[in-house]
């Protein structure tokens, strides 16, 4: 037996995970304006920074861009209800968890 390093690869929950999810929802809600270039500079930089570090939101942005390409317009904000956002975030987590 030489398994002295067992358990090192176990993913640990980050302390700021709950807060991160709130940030993700806020970012997702801003992505419509982000795509249209309608965000003010400080906010846009904030969203950019979040996208840099958040694969889930980058995937959502790609999905949103794809939707815009297919439908020709952004989905109405009313359609992006919290339940849908929650589902999307969970889906993205599942997808990104494979890597
Ligand atoms: Zn995010």
Image: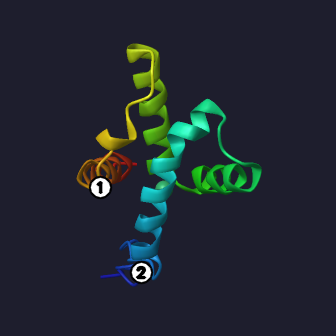
Relative to 56, 54 lies left or right: right
Please give the residue where the numbered disc 1 appears in the rendered image: 82
Residue 21 percent across, percent down from the top left: 41, 65
Crowd rating for badge 2 (residues with CA inside 10 Å; few <14, some 14–19, many 20+): few
88 or 55, nearer to the observer: 88
Q: Is mark 2 within 8 Å of ligand 1?
A: no
Identify which residue is drawn at 60% across, 56% down.
50
Residue extending furthest toward the right: 41
Please give the residue where the numbered disc 2 appears in the rendered image: 5
Q: Specify how the rendered protein is coloured.
A: rainbow
Vertical placement of residue 61 versus 40, above or below? above
State if disc 2 and disc 1 touch (CB < 8 Å): no
Vertical placement of residue 18 versus 66, above or below? below
Q: Earlier in the sequence, mark 1 or mark 2?
A: 2
Q: Secondary structure under badge 2?
A: loop
Of badges 1 and 2, the one in the foreground is: 1
Residue 91 percent across, percent down from the top left: 28, 48
Mark 1–mark 2 distance (CA, rounded to whole Å): 41 Å
Relative to 1, 70 lies left or right: right
Residue 24 percent across, percent down from the top left: 46, 58
């Amino acid at each position: 037996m030489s398994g002295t390093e067992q358990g090192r690869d176990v993913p640990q929950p980050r302390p700021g995970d709950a807060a991160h999810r709130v940030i993700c929802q806020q970012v997702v809600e801003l992505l419509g304006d982000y795509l249209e270039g309608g965000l003010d500079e400080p906010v846009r930089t904030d969203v950019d920074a979040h996208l840099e570090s958040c694969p889930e939101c980058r995937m959502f942005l790609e999905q949103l861009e794809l939707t815009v390409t297919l439908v020709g317009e952004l989905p109405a904000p009313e359609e992006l209800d919290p339940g849908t956002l929650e589902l999307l975030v969970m889906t993205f987590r599942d997808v990104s968890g494979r890597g």
